Amino acid sequence: MTTPWQPFSEPGRNTALRTFGIAIVVGIALALGSRGRIAASTAVLLVLWFSLGGHFVELWFLNWLRPRLPVSRGAQIAGRLGAWFVGGVAIAFGMAMTARLLTGAPPTRQLAWWVGGLAFIGLELVVHFLMLLRGLPSIYDGRG
């Protein structure tokens, strides 16, 4: 049985403009909001973990995992939420390691490993809601 899913691709320029643009805007806002405790360059790099890393998590789901899952809506949603959770844990871990490397800060009390996964799921649900409002395929309408 052939699945209805087409591989997703977009020009690298579009990906770079979107992911780096998000990282720059959000990173600078975080740096300004920290009142000098976080350098803008560090904040931008840390946000890039979520913007660019999140792009690759989504690409992996769309082009590798999704075609291998049953076409039922429940299986697709469960697979996507699972991919987001695991991807979010990995991204949060990479982000924490990068923060320690850049700031030289010793390891402090760490958040539970699952917080990054849940945070990433929440972030992706917001992003997909905004996509739905723009008429783009999203998890909410079953087209994305």
Image: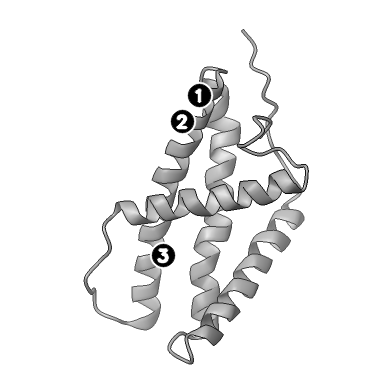
Q: Position of residue 110 (x, y in %)?
A: 25, 66
- Amino acid type, mark 2: Ala
Q: Position of residue 132 (x, y in %)?
A: 70, 43
The residue that label 1 is drawn on is 74
Query: Which residue is found at the position 70% from the left and 54% from the top?
Result: 15
Query: Which residue is found at the position 61% from the left and 37% from the top?
Result: 139
Q: Is residue 90 visible?
A: no
When the figure is inspected, residue 20 is found, relative to residue 126, above or below; the finding is below
Category of crowding for the residue at label 1, using alpha-carbon neighbours closer than 10 angstroms: few (below 14), some (14–19), many (at least 20): few
Residue 142 found in image quarter: top right
Residue in the foreground of this view, choosing between 124 and 17:
124
- Amino acid type, mark 1: Gly
On residue 12, the disc is none
Q: Is residue 71 left or right of residue 85?
A: right
- Amino acid type, mark 3: Met
Residue 92 found in image quarter: bottom left
Mark 1, secondary structure of its residue: helix
The residue that label 3 is drawn on is 95
Category of crowding for the residue at label 3, using alpha-carbon neighbours closer than 10 angstroms: few (below 14), some (14–19), many (at least 20): some
Q: Residue furthest bottom?
A: 36
> Mark 2 or mark 3: which comes first in sequence?
2
When the figure is inspected, residue 39 is found, relative to residue 137, above or below; the finding is below
**Which quadrant of the figure contains the N terminus?**
top right
**Which quadrant of the figure contains the C terminus?**
top right
The residue that label 2 is drawn on is 78
